[in-house]
Amino acid sequence: MAACSSQPQRAQHTQQSYNTQENAAFLAEYKKWQGVPYRLGGTNYSGVDCSAFVQAVYKDAYALSLPRTTAQQVKVGEKVSYNNAQSGDLVFFKTGRKTRHVGIYLGGNTFMHASTSKGVVLSRLDNPYWASTFWHFRSVQ
């Protein structure tokens, strides 16, 4: 009688850990970039914005070329439902009326990104700010 269950099932991706062999290339890139400050228009270790960080990580980890800007990246690949998100999917947020933000989903409700306030960090999708600004996932692999 699974249909009568009183507990809703959690999305599968929220139960997995992000520290997996599947994420080894992403986590190796994260270690190189961790703590690099955010700089709008920045593309290197002295300062990077969110879309340049995503572009650089994909290029170095998987030799995959992504467009430079969030506006261009949001058109790449295919939209993925929240419950079907996989490690490596791009995660997009609407952080202002016309402002968008992008990161790389790692599974376990965790994503890496270049935060305007903290630089390159790991964050959680269930953080109230990120949960309230979440837009969608896109698969690019």
Image (cartoon, rainbow, N blue to C red):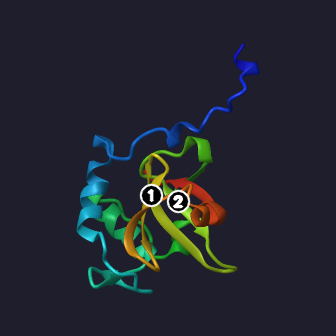
Amino acid type of the residue that numbered disc 1 sits on in the rendered structure? Phe
Q: Say what secondary structure mark 2 lies in.
A: strand
Of 92 and 31, the residue lying toward us: 31
Residue at image mark 1: 111
Q: Quadrant of residue 49?
A: bottom left
Q: Residues within 10 Å of mark 1 (few under 14, many from 20)?
A: many
Q: Are marks 2 and 1 in contact (CB under 8 Å)?
A: yes
Instruction: Say whether residue 75 is visible.
Output: no
Percent x, y of residue 20:
31, 42
Percent x, y of residue 76:
52, 61
Percent x, y of residue 127:
55, 60
Task: Please state the total of marks drawn on the protein image.
Answer: 2
User: What residue is drawn where x is 38% and y is 47%?
Assistant: 18
Percent x, y of residue 27:
29, 55
Residue 91 is marked as 2
Task: Report, in whole angstroms, how far the alpha carbon at label 2 lies from the one at label 1.
Answer: 8 Å
Of 35 and 42, the residue lying toward us: 35
